[in-house]
């Protein structure tokens, strides 16, 4: 039992790390990762929703009728997204403004609904929590990495601190829209090279 | 009138929903492997987004704002969109079977397409009037369709090319999308 909890947790960190292994939920990965701070903030908000919705879906899995399960899952997820929205407005208003439309859009993030449908609706609460936490942390890590690469190359800063001397010319392409796609594509290529040895 | 032309151009090209706003990227990569599925998805998005844009605008103005319930926007919008998609599906199945056969499998996917919900939220955020919201929704959807169909054509050509192994499939698709996005970037100065 203890072993499988660890397994469910760690699979999200490498074997099924979103969005590299599970190509789902690309929009926030591309949209908010202009800096590492934004990426991590978005990742944590998603992790919170993922864990809470996984627990509740798992707890209610015997009550929810199979025919309307997707609608029920969406309502559960939307509730927690609203909770996150209100919490962020209260405690992290600057970040909330930066992430903008992407916070309410956690509702339609395929990862969250995907985990509810594929995992939480079939497993008990502890396993579902481990699964949600693992996938969520994996997602946060990916967002952080993409954010770090784009921030360092695109503006020459890391968490807002300047890294290089005055002679450094920022590679502005990376923080603009096309850079997001190219950066993610190259990171995916790198993952494939390391993972397929 | 001039304002509307500016709005249309900015929604289709400058602020293209896929390539500049990063909304709806899952179906962008998921359905662009074949031209047929790309066309089907593009049509379904245009069809649903215009209706969703209208109905969420009405909900926001006459229900949420009237009763001060803006904090419920996320839950209400997703429910309205899900119900709308279900309704459209039932209506098409009964009345226009030919169109249903074409759009059928793509309709359920639209509920979780963030381009639809995202465009509705942007309409509210920009405080568009009803007509502006309708025009913007249609233009966003048209921009989605344009980018998706262009990209599907490119991916069909990539299938014939020899791509290094680690770059295959999604990786090369992302880099290609970056280049397509770069070409849309050239429209930045227009509006």
Image: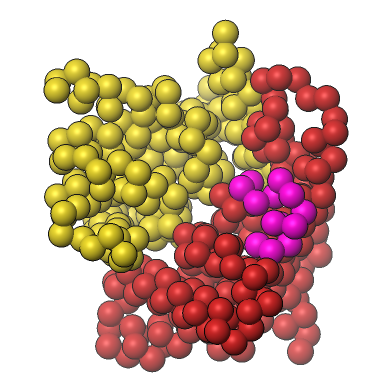
Indicate the chain coloured yellow by its letter. A
Q: Is residue A195 left or right of residue B42?
A: left
The residue shown at (28%, 60%) is A66
- State the residue in front, B18 or B145: B145
* Residue B11 colored in magenta in the image: no
- State the residue in front, B134 or A33: B134
Q: How is the image coloured?
A: by chain
Q: Give the range drawn in magenta.
A: B29-41
Which quadrant would the C terminus of chain B be assigned to in this image? bottom right
The residue shown at (50%, 30%) is A21
> Percent from the top left, x then y, of residue B49?
58, 73
> Percent from the top left, x then y, of residue B42?
68, 64
* Residue B33 colored in magenta in the image: yes
> Percent from the top left, x then y, of residue B100?
62, 74
The reply to whether residue B136 is visible in this rendering is no
Colour assigned to chain B in the rendering is red
Q: Is residue A132 left or right of residue B109?
A: left
> Percent from the top left, x then y, of residue A157?
53, 29
- State the residue in front, A164 or A50: A50
């Amino acid at each position: 039992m203890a072993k499988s909890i660890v397994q469910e947790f760690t699979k999200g960190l490498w074997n099924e790390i979103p969005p590299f292994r599970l190509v789902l939920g690309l929009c926030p990965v591309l949209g908010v990762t202009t800096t590492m701070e934004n990426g991590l903030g978005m990742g944590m908000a998603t992790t919170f929703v993922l864990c809470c919705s996984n627990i509740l879906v798992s707890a209610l899995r015997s009550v929810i009728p199979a025919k309307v399960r997707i609608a029920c899952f969406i309502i559960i997820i939307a509730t927690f997204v609203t909770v996150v929205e209100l919490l962020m407005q209260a405690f992290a208003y600057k970040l909330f403004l930066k992430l903008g439309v992407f916070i309410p859009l956690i509702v339609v993030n395929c990862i969250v609904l995907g985990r509810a449908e594929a995992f939480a609706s079939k497993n008990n609460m502890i396993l579902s929590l481990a699964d949600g936490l693992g996938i969520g942390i994996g997602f946060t890590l990916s967002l952080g990495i993409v954010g770090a690469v784009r921030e360092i190359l695109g503006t020459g800063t890391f968490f807002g601190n300047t890294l290089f001397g005055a002679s450094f010319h920022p590679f502005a392409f990376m923080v603009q829209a096309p850079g997001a796609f190219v950066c993610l594509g190259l990171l995916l290529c790198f993952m494939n090279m390391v993972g397929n040895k | 009138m001039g304002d509307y032309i500016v709005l249309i151009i900015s929604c289709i090209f400058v602020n293209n929903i896929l390539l500049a706003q990063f909304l709806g990227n899952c179906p962008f990569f998921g359905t662009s492997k074949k031209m047929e599925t790309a066309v089907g998805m593009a049509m379904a998005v245009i069809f649903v987004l215009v209706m969703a844009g209208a109905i969420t605008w009405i909900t926001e103005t006459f229900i949420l704002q009237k009763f001060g319930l803006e904090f419920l926007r996320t839950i209400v919008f997703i429910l309205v969109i899900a119900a709308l998609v279900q309704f459209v599906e039932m209506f098409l199945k009964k009345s226009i079977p030919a169109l249903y056969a074409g759009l059928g499998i793509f309709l359920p996917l639209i509920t979780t397409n963030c381009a639809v919900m995202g465009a509705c939220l942007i309409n509210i955020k920009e405080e568009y009037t009803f007509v502006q919201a309708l025009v913007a929704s249609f233009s966003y959807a048209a921009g989605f369709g344009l980018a998706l169909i262009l990209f599907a054509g490119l991916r069909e050509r990539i299938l014939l090319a020899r791509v290094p192994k680690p770059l295959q499939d999604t990786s090369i698709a992302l880099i290609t999308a970056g280049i397509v996005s770069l070409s849309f970037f050239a429209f930045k100065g227009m509006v």
